[in-house]
Amino acid sequence: MTVISTVTDPNALMLTVVAEFSASPERVWGVWEDPRQLERWWGPPTYPATFTRHDFAVGGESRYYMTGPEGDTSRGYWRMVIIDEPNRLEFANGLAGDDGEPRPDLEPMAASVEFEPIDGGTRMISLSKFVDAVQMKILLDMGMAEGMTQAVSQIDALL
Amino acid sequence: MVVHQLADREVDRIFRALADTTRRDIFERVIGKGLSVSSLANDYEMSFAAVQKHVSVLERASLVTKERHGREQIVLSNVPTLRRVTALLEGFEEIWIGRAARIAEILGEKGSET
């Protein structure tokens, strides 16, 4: 099993996902660093991501868009805060406007990822920290796809 | 849809309310047991009015309710709201489970090992 644990902390607005892979930390790091690999997993098959820019260095930025089944697109960006290959990376992930540039009216979420060597592979700990529900809702809609319809309809029912 | 717009605003209030450390602390402490505003105020290095203000923000976000018991205002947690926040987080949890599975697939490809 790839994902070994998840923790949702509604009081701290935080999500932690721990996954294990049978590949070295350097190799797992590669799926983040290489935009061509990154766009094969960041969005689901029905909502694939295309990275038009991926400056994987401290202070560097990325631009991407996700294309939905109806040809609809949503745009986002990353701003790299920490790049410590192959141990840890931290970045801000926010929404971009139609021009592809960061929307100043919405705060980005904070993402941090740790890569720990384990016997025969890597443990990847992904932490997402949210600050604003509007942005969170849009990001959630952005990542919405087939496999998610159940979760989303549950959320809609709860809201 | 108007219903959804209202819901979004409501959710936004929840997140803004919980973005503050003191308010998160107050909220956590009243879960399962009500506490009076004055007893809460005793535990923070801020004025009664400041604590009351934090409680009001939590109240507007429907995270807590206030009940009057004699001369005391008792702050109580509103659990259904917490469930909604959890539901939003669970949406992201599903996204990440999908991402991890796709990463594993990419890593498992022949010739991808280093």
Image: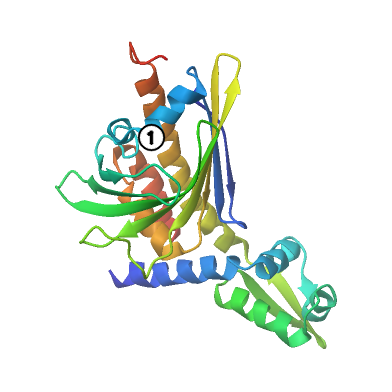
Compared to residue A85, the image places residue B110 above or below, namely above
Q: Quadrant of the N terminus of chain B?
A: bottom left
Residue placed farthest to the left in the image? Answer: A71
Say which quarter of the image contains residue A147: top left
Task: Name the residue: 56% across, 13% down.
Answer: A120
Q: Residue A11, percent across and down?
A: 62, 58
Q: How is the image coloured?
A: rainbow
Can you give x and y, in whole percent of width and height, for residue A60 in the image?
39, 49
Which corner quadrant of the image does residue A38 belong to? top left
In this view, A114 is above or below A28:
below
Residue underneath mark 1:
A33
Q: Residues within 10 Å of mark 1 (few under 14, many from 20)?
A: some
Nearer to the camera, B30 or B68: B30
Residue B78 is situated, as x and y percent measured from the top left of the image, at 63, 66
Q: Who's the residue at 38% across and 73% down the image?
A: B6
Locate residue A134 relative to residue A123 in the image: left or right. Answer: left
* Rendered-image quadrant of the C terminus of chain B: top left
Which residue sits at x=36%, y=16%?
B112
- The image quadrant that residue B83 belongs to is bottom right
Q: Residue at x 77, y 69 (%)?
A: B34
Q: Amino acid at mark 1?
A: Glu
Instruction: State the residue in front, B14 or A95.
Output: A95
Image x and y of residue A92, in percent? 45, 53
Image position of B13 (left or right of B20): left
Frontmost residue, B79 versus B105: B105
Mark 1: secondary structure: helix
Chain of residue at mark 1: A
